[in-house]
């Protein structure tokens, strides 16, 4: 499998430059993003680290602060927003974003963590998405202890639009079923061998992610 990798830097500056590439060289603003989606349709992988993770989401996280700049990201990870270099003390920022964009799931990613996402269309026409949480706590350089929070147990933080909180561990997965117009949306969390309904945070009547996908 071939992959394209988006690198670090400032999320908004990089996003603008990516979009300008198409306008400058092909007369098509945003051609770069179209190419990423075409690659995805062919089963190719796109990886974003640091600012790249922000840029692959639905919107840059700074959209929640009301800045007047272009903050529509590439949307490879549909209806999702992420913060970078996250610490739990910044959870109020997640809560604010979740209230503003209730159709999005909002995640705070500490160093070194990430999200792995796959999605598609069900026979019903509904959209499915499975997100796996990835946490690397193997970095053992003592001089990086302040920078790499996962080494000391930091988890991926998530705030609901109604203010409820969830911390995701490495290997946890989220399955979402949504209609194309976002009028219908359900989700489940697979964690520790259990399948939990996202909305109620109670054990699901479904026994597996595969059963969820077959039911919608």
Image (spheres, rainbow, N blue to C red):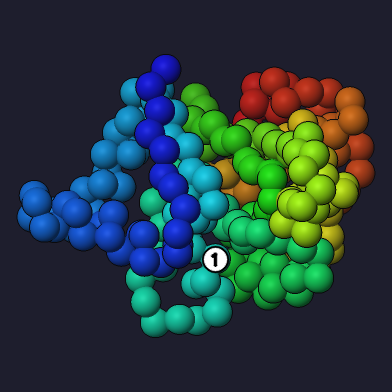
Residue 87, quarter of the rendered image: bottom right
Helix or strand or loop: what does disc 1 sit on?
Answer: helix
Q: Is residue 210 above or below residue 87?
A: above
Residue that badge 1 annotates: 61
- The number of discs equals 1
Q: Is residue 5 left or right of residue 90?
A: left
Q: Nearer the viewer, residue 77 or 134?
A: 134
Q: Is residue 62 above or below residue 180?
A: below
Q: Quadrant of the C terminus?
A: top right
Answer with the quarter of the image where residue 20 lies.
bottom left
Q: Say left or right for 69 vs 96.
A: left
Q: Position of residue 203 (x, y in %)?
A: 91, 37
97 over 68 or under it: above or below? above
Q: What residue is at 81 percent from the left and 48 percent from the top?
A: 142
Q: What's the residue at 13%, 58% (across, down)?
A: 23
Question: Which residue shows up at 78% across the image and 23% down it?
Answer: 208
User: Can residue 49 be seen at all in this image of the molecule?
Assistant: yes
Q: Position of residue 120 (x, y in %)?
A: 49, 30
Q: Mark 1 packing: few (<14 Cα in 10 Å), some, or many (20+)?
A: many
From the image, which quarter does the N terminus lie in? top left
- Foreground: 47 or 160? 47
Q: Position of residue 182 (x, y in %)?
A: 53, 53
Apparent side of residue 162 relative to residue 129 in the rendered image (left or right): right
Give percent across and percent down for residue 125: 47, 34
Residue 204 in view here: no
Tell me what residue is drawn at x 40 percent, y 28 percent.
Answer: 3
């Amino acid at each position: 499998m071939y992959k394209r990798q988006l690198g670090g830097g400032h999320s908004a500056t990089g996003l603008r430059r990516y979009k300008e590439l198409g306008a400058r060289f092909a007369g098509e603003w945003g051609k770069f993003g179209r190419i990423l989606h075409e690659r995805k349709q062919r089963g190719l992988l796109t990886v974003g680290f640091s600012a790249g993770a922000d840029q692959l989401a639905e919107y840059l996280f700074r959209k929640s602060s009301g800045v007047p700049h272009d903050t529509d990201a590439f949307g490879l990870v549909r209806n999702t927003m992420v913060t970078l270099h996250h610490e739990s003390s910044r959870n109020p920022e997640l809560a604010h974003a979740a209230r503003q964009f209730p159709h999005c799931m909002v995640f705070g990613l500490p160093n070194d963590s990430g999200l792995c996402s796959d999605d598609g269309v069900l026979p019903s026409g509904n959209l499915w998405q499975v997100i796996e949480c990835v946490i690397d706590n193997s970095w053992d350089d003592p001089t990086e202890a302040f920078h790499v929070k996962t080494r000391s147990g930091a988890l991926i933080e998530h705030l609901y639009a109604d203010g409820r909180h969830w911390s995701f561990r490495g290997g946890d997965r989220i399955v979402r079923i949504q209609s194309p117009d976002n009028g219908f949306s359900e989700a489940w969390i697979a964690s520790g061998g259990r399948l939990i309904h996202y909305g109620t945070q109670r054990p699901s009547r479904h026994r597996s992610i595969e059963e969820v996908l077959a039911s919608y």
